Image (cartoon, rainbow, N blue to C red):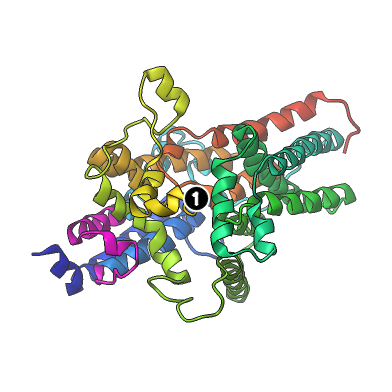
Amino acid sequence: MDPKALLGSGVLAPFTVAVLAVSLWLLRKAVDRVGPSRPNMVSVVFHLHLLLQTFFCALLVSAGVSGHYLLARVSPLNLLLGWALLCWALLGFPAGVLLVKRVLERRFPKEAHLASLNSEATTIEPVQHDKADAYFAIVFTLSLVCVSALAYTLALTPRIALLELLRGEPVENVLRARISSKYQFGGIEHIRNIFVLTILPFLSLVSFAQLRLGREPRWIALSTALFLCSVIALSYDTQKAPVLTYFASIALVFLFAAKALSLKRLALGGAAFGALLTGVYLLVTQAGLRAGLFSLTSGLPGRVFFTQASGVFLSLEHFPATHSFLGLRSLSSILSRLAGWEHSERSARLLMRSVHPGAVEDGRAGVINSLFIAESYANFGWIGALVSPLYVGIFTGVFFFFVSGRRLTPLTLGLLAFFAMRWPLTGGMNEFLYNPSIVLLLGLAFLIPALAKVLPGRTA
């Protein structure tokens, strides 16, 4: 049957729903809890990236609804193939997490509580019972370093998009300032990426988690300062997603260590977050409450249900037709130099160059981020697309077990909340091959208590 006719027939829509049912069954087997009243890191990652941003796109495409401005550029055959890849991601990811659980149950049969990737712990324990001052001193010192790095970043950013937005500059100027802040930053990118965009919000979440143990004035002051600095760090370039995910991470700090929530509280929280999302979207895009704001093809729903998954379809359209498969050439410039390869921009940037070349040239457009399977295909072709959902599921399961199998402290709680919202399912495959942030924050979570043990300080 012709792909266009097949997509428009509605035959694939029931199959898409069946895929979701199997996916949820696999997830429940892997982490026991999949409902919103008692979330954990894996369930949040699944619902955010695979249910909200993948399933609904697959369902709409399978029902012949593909009028989104990005999908209009894709051939019917690649729409069909992209739908198949989205369905496979829905199945392969929870299957990979479940595989980890089954291996752990066989490997540690006498430690069944560790084999479950679903920590039931709700009581937060101090990081160091007898070194409260030393622990605070370490977190405070790291915070000072991060705040200094934020000042350094703002000083060496040629144009602050947030300031231009607040001054009422046209949206085109704000977009140029956003791209300029990323690609024309005058400082050392590693300082910005590590201390400002990673460690600073992580420490903020840790300080909020610490407040669950008691409202000490020093922790209240530190958490307030880190909150304000994190909001600036994650919004100075007017990107919407980072600051929204930060707010959601703060909520998860309290949800992960709480009893089951009532439906009323969940509904109120969901409505509040939806209103915040709409408000930030209106502010940044300067859209106004005009017709089309809630359009499925070009408004806010289109951004949620179509845009994040559209890179999968565009990757099929442009690789290898427009760009050759990248392999590992986009992973790291250092690796490319060592291997003698010509380093390449990542597929998300190449896709934007293909789709909106003029907007890239004049600095109004950056990348087309998408589900990890898009970059996996762009890097390694069909082999990468078929293997990556299982691989990413296994990677996620191992990380979650490693962290949740330990005592629930402000540091481990901060880790789970941080990565629940920033786990790179939407972003790219490269983050699951080379991700210094994961290694860095894991290292901090274990190094801080170790340092607190050896430093002098008043006991708690």
The residue tagged 1 is 363
Residue at image location 57% in from the left, 46% down from the top: 180
Q: Is residue 357 left or right of residue 254?
A: left
Quarter of the image that includes the N terminus: bottom left
Q: Residue furthest left?
A: 1
Q: Is residue 300 left or right of residue 231?
A: left
Quarter of the image that includes the C terminus: top right
Whether residue 64 appears in magenta in the rendering, the answer is yes
Give the image location of residue 261, x and y in percent: 61, 68
Residue at image location 72% in from the left, 38% down from the top: 152
Residue at image location 48% in from the left, 41% down from the top: 115
Helix, strand, or loop for circle 1?
Answer: loop
Give the image location of residue 175, x and y in percent: 54, 56
Give the image location of residue 116, x and y in percent: 49, 46
Q: Is residue 157 positioned above or below 439 on the image?
A: below
Give the image location of residue 254, x and y in percent: 67, 58
Whether residue 201 appears in magenta in the rendering, the answer is no
Residue at image location 40% in from the left, 46% down from the top: 348
Q: Is residue 409 left or right of residue 337?
A: right
Which SS type dominates the magenta stretch? helix
| Callout 1 amino acid | Gly
Q: Is residue 90 positioned above or below 455 on the image?
A: below
Query: Looking at this view, is 106 or 409 the one in front?
Result: 409
> Residue 258 is drawn in which quadrant?
bottom right
Q: Which residues are magenta?
A: 62-87
> Residue 274 is drawn in which quadrant?
bottom right
